[in-house]
Image: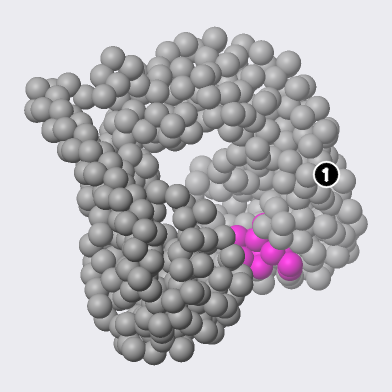
Amino acid sequence: MRIAPYFPREVCVFILLTIAQQAPAQAAQPSAGKGTSAQALDAAAALVQKGQFSEAATLARKAVVLAPGSAVAHNLLGLIEEQLKHSATAEAEYERAIRLDPRFAAARANLGNLLLAEGKPAQAQMQLQKAVTLDPASARAHYNLALVLIKTNDYAHAADQFEAVQKLRGDDPTIVLMFVGAALKANETERALKAADAVSSSHPQEPKILFNLSLLLAQNAQYGKAAELFSEVNRLRPGTAEVLYNLGVAEYNLKHLDAAADALAEAADLKPDLTEAHFRLGLIASERQDHENAILEFQHSIDHASDRAQYYYLLGREQFALGRWEQAAASYRKAAELDPKQPLYALSLGNAFFRAENYAAAAKAFETTAQLDPKTEDIQYLIGYCDRVQGKMDEARAHLEQQLHADPKHVRALDSLGFVLLEQSDPAGAQAQLERAAALAPDDVDVLFDLARTYSRGKQTDKAIETFQRVLRLSPENSQAHYQLFLLYNRSQHTEEAKKEMAEFQRLQEMDKMVRREETALSRMRKAEADRGVTPNSNAGDAR
């Protein structure tokens, strides 16, 4: 809500003149100067009312010359100079008026307003507080003091000042709304909601007031009351996209997903380019695990706002959830291009490349993430793992050791470092790292498998056999563990055991081939359906 002075400046001039002329200090002015000065002041005030400030300034200066001890004249000249954007001169004139009459509340209020506009809230607060003390009936002084208090985040006292304005000015919904906002910021929820109920009850057929009140409540997380009022505004003014959108957002924050989807869908139908409505519909579909429709809604958002990095990120997240790694990578890449300083986008891009087994691209994205946010969890491990898979063992070792320096109990980094050391012909070093990992995660199949390989390389056959058997107790269908046992039994001339392990290995390999054939057939079927224009959930509608 735009904050502005409560009264028009020209009206203030006459209010302040009236107050000033009642000030005791004016009685001390020489009688000879009174009439002439008063005439100049009256003429200046008349010109101010017409907006002729330059001419008014000439007469006000004349009044000051004729009656230099007149606080009224200095105050009026200050007002005029302020209108002419001569802030320093206006401030000096207000200060002269206050020196002549320290109880001149209107001059203090004017000086406070000017100081507030100049970005001097502490000084403004001091003058406005004195003005309110001297003239408790000045609604304008209370109002502007409230504005100062808001700038200093003193919302509780700002609410008190808005309440004072309301008592002085009567039924003014604008002031009540400002009071509600300040009270909510001050966590005086009960007080704020009571005032909100009062204004909604006194203006039940005024949708503009109710809508602004609803927005204020929603902005301060009072979604229940906001949704109630948005619904009432929708009843008074049905078919308004903005109202329906805000109703949908309030219902979404209340976790009423069906009601939210209905309101947002209607808003999007009324105004198809209402980007945020599609965005929220995408979020709802995502929460329902309806990734296909989430993709459609986020794509709608992108169609109308192609410069929003967040939309591409959310689109990529849904594609990632469906295992569409390359599509997800393309969306994440666009998000990262639009917002290159966001580590989450670079990290997500790395994860998509990783899943697509494009380890070189993944490592590059992870390195970018590390540059943007070195404290990203597991980031050195991820880079090290990608380097390891690419055969860059020296680089992998450096990153993995860096991860372990930050987190000595990082099981995955210990496991990968053990693997790297084994490849670098350091079986003793590999064994040390992997045994540490196994002690931390005794049921971790990957760690045990790599440890068993290390024992095997070190000719510790019994330990290797025992560890591979632990792997199979945890993961009976691990075909590679069966194959490694076959090799170990064969090496130690346990012929029968070797035959059994080879038979099991071959059975599992055949099963794996069968699964891959089925997956290939399913993939071809889906591609054929897509070519014919048939998509999954094509009859399911959207998140609406």
The residue that appears at 68% across and 25% down in the rendered structure is: 225
- Asked if residue 371 can be seen in this view, the reply is no
Please tell me whether residue 508 is drawn above or below residue 375 in the rendered image: above
Q: Position of residue 235 (x, y in %)?
A: 54, 10
Q: Position of residue 20 (x, y in %)?
A: 79, 52
Q: Nearer the viewer, residue 66 or 286?
A: 286
Q: Position of residue 304 (x, y in %)?
A: 26, 37
Please tell me whether residue 441 is drawn above or below residue 527 in the rendered image: below
State left or right for residue 446 relative to residue 529.
right
Q: Nearer the viewer, residue 528 or 374?
A: 528
Whether residue 282 appears in magenta in the rendering, the answer is no
Give the image quarter of residue 18. Answer: top right
Neighbour class for label 1 at 10 Å: few (<14), some, many (≥20)? some
Element under disc 1: helix
Whether residue 116 appears in magenta in the rendering, the answer is yes
Question: Over which residues does the magenta segment extend?
Answer: 113-124
Give the image quarter of residue 544. Answer: top left
- Asked if residue 228 can be seen in this view, the reply is yes
State left or right for residue 522 relative to residue 35.
left
The residue that appears at 81% across and 70% down in the rendered structure is: 99
Please tell me whether residue 526 is drawn above or below residue 133 in the rendered image: above
- For the stretch drawn in magenta, the main secondary structure is helix
State left or right for residue 414 relative to residue 10.
left
Q: Position of residue 165 (x, y in %)?
A: 78, 38
Q: Amino acid at mark 1?
A: Asp
The residue that appears at 46% across and 72% down in the rendered structure is: 464
Q: Which quarter of the rendering shows the N terminus? A: top right
The residue that appears at 54% across and 56% down in the rendered structure is: 83
Image coloring type: one colour
Give the number of callouts.
Answer: 1
Kindly identify which residue carries mark 1.
Answer: 160
